[in-house]
């Protein structure tokens, strides 16, 4: 249910369906930063998307380490 609701919110905001679960991960992170999701909502969505294989690109982690 959480993922379906998240997809619906994504479609309302972006006017298109997500192409990959990573897009949903980016969406919840941005929503959390802008105060649209509480930390509890963010964690629930994050863990659901993580189960579906969502992940940040490795290049992001490589830039942080440099």
Image (cartoon, rainbow, N blue to C red):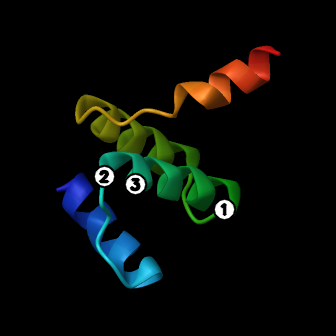
The structure residue drawn at horizontal position 77% and vertical position 14%, both measured from the top left corner, is: 65
Q: Among all residues in the image, which is located at the extreme top?
A: 65
Tell me the residue that label 3 is attached to: 24
Q: Which residue is mark 1?
A: 35
Residue 58 placement (x, y as % from top left): 55, 25
Splitting the image into 4 quarters, where does residue 35 fall?
bottom right
Q: Determine whether, in the image, residue 3 is placed left or right of residue 57.
A: left
The tally of labels here is 3
- Residue plotted at (56% across, 53% down): 38
State which quarter of the image contains the C terminus: top right
Q: Nearer the viewer, mark 1 or mark 3?
A: 3
Label 1 and label 3: CA atoms lie apart by 16 Å
Q: CA distance from mark 3 to mark 2?
A: 7 Å
- Image coordinates of residue 44 in percent, x first then y, are 37, 41
Local packing at callout 2 (Cα closer than 10 Å; few below 14, some 14-19, many 20+) is: few
Q: Is residue 55 above or below residue 33?
A: above
Pair 3/2: label in front: 2
Q: Are marks 3 and 2 in contact (CB under 8 Å)?
A: yes
- The numbered disc on residue 9 is none
Regarding mark 1 in the picture, which secondary structure is present there? loop
The quarter holding residue 61 reads top right
Give the Cα separation between the discs numbered 1 and 2. Answer: 23 Å
Dot 3 surroundings within 10 Å: few (below 14), some, or many (20 or more)? many
Which comes sooner in the sequence, label 1 or label 3? 3
Q: Residue at x 65, y 31 (%)?
A: 60
Q: Which residue is farthest left?
A: 1
């Amino acid at each position: 249910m959480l993922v379906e609701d998240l997809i619906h919110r994504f479609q309302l905001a972006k006017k298109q369906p997500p192409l990959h679960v990573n897009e949903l991960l980016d969406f919840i992170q941005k929503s959390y930063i802008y105060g649209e999701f509480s930390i509890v909502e963010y964690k629930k969505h994050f863990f659901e998307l993580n189960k579906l294989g969502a992940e940040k690109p490795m290049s992001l982690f490589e830039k942080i380490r440099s």
